[in-house]
Amino acid sequence: MRTTTKSGRKRRILAAAVVTAILVGGAGAAYAYWTNTGSGTGSATTGTNVPITINQSTVVTALAPGLAAQTLSGTFTNTNSGPVYVASVTVSIGTITGGGPTCEATDYVLTNGTMTVNAQVPAGTGVGSWTGATIAFNNKAGENQNDCKNAVVALVYTSN
């Protein structure tokens, strides 16, 4: 039979205590946190934009009976921070000033008044382009159209 010395017994007791401490400490570490669930909220917003300005870049002058139609074209001013999509530009005749009292919108002819753009217009001034409509003087047969001399025809542009 083997006899155990006092120092050998102390070592075994110390080793058993260390193993026990590791096991108990490890088990405590495994459960040393709280479990939980939670929830929260947040948000995101979208911006908006402001209308663009349609600029006529062609200069239309000297409309008169029997002269050829003149093409209308131009650019855009987009003051938004990013591009905007323009499907088309439409032109119509607005007020007529400077002529006589009988000069009216029917004394002028707009052709292709809706012009297809189908493009994104970048932010900036003088950007993008549109073209295609024409304006001419309507030479009404048998009618004195002297009241349209020196008239100024306001053209109204809209986009969508």
Image: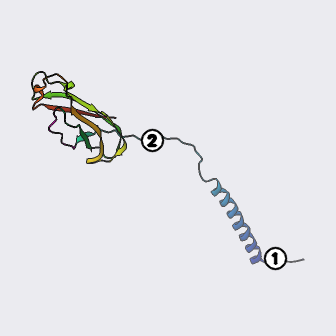
Q: Is residue 92 visible?
A: no
Q: Is residue 38 left or right of residue 31?
A: left
Which span of residues is magenta-colored? Answer: 57-64
Quarter assignment of residue 98? top left
Magenta segment includes 59: yes
Front residue of 38 and 114: 114
Q: Residue at x 18, y 39 (%)?
A: 60
Identify the mark at residue 112; answer none if there is no mark: none
Q: Is residue 26 above or below residue 82?
A: below
Give the amino acid type for the residue marked by disc 2 in the picture: Gly
Quarter assignment of residue 129? top left
Marks 2 and 1: which is nearer the front? 2
Q: Is residue 104 left or right of residue 157?
A: left
Looking at the picture, how far across and down is residue 123, in whole percent?
30, 47
Q: Secondary structure at mark 2?
A: loop
Q: Residue at x 69, y 67 (%)?
A: 18
Magenta segment includes 22: no
Give the amino acid type for the residue marked by disc 1 in the picture: Thr
Q: Secondary structure at mark 1?
A: loop
Front residue of 125 and 22: 125
**Residue at image mark 1:** 4
